[in-house]
Amino acid sequence: MPRFMIQGTFTADGLRGLLKDGGSGRVEAVRRMAESAGGQLESFDFCFGDNDTYVICELPDNKAAAAVALAVGSSGGATTKTVALLTPAEVDQAVHQSVEYRAPGV
């Protein structure tokens, strides 16, 4: 199943919710969300910096990842950026796949 990294940043409302529910409550909510989309939560970490959370989850496909992004974004509690993750084997396959490309101006 494809893996995705979801980088999250809480809004003011999201931070108020975090203060109310705690970190474990957020993890459980995200676990339920991933499972409801047909996937599973692999890891959930809180962090300092530009993002407040990093979530790694398996989801069935890009449509499921888009549904998750839409659900989170429309909640008003956080903004997210979703990144598709590749395994080393997938990168090996990409290395051996021939594609045609012309650089701009060449």
Image: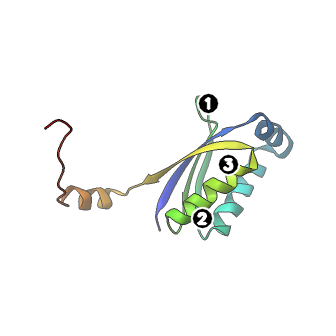
Q: Nearer the viewer, mark 2 or mark 3?
A: 3
Q: Nearer the viewer, mark 3 or mark 1?
A: 3
Q: Residue 14 bears which disc, if any?
A: none
- Could you say which quadrant of the image residue 79 lies in? top right
Which is more N-terminal, label 3 or label 2? 2
Q: Which residue is mark 1?
A: 48
**Pointer 2 or 1: first along the chain:** 2
Q: Earlier in the sequence, mark 3 or mark 1?
A: 1
Q: Which mark is residue 73?
A: 3
Q: Give the residue at mark 2.
A: 40
Q: CA distance from mark 2 to mark 3?
A: 19 Å
Does residue 3 appear to the left or right of 30 in the view shown? left
For this view, does 81 lie left or right of residue 23? left
Residue furthest to the top: 49
Residue at 59% across / 28% down in the picture?
A: 49
Q: Position of residue 102 (x, y in %)?
A: 17, 45
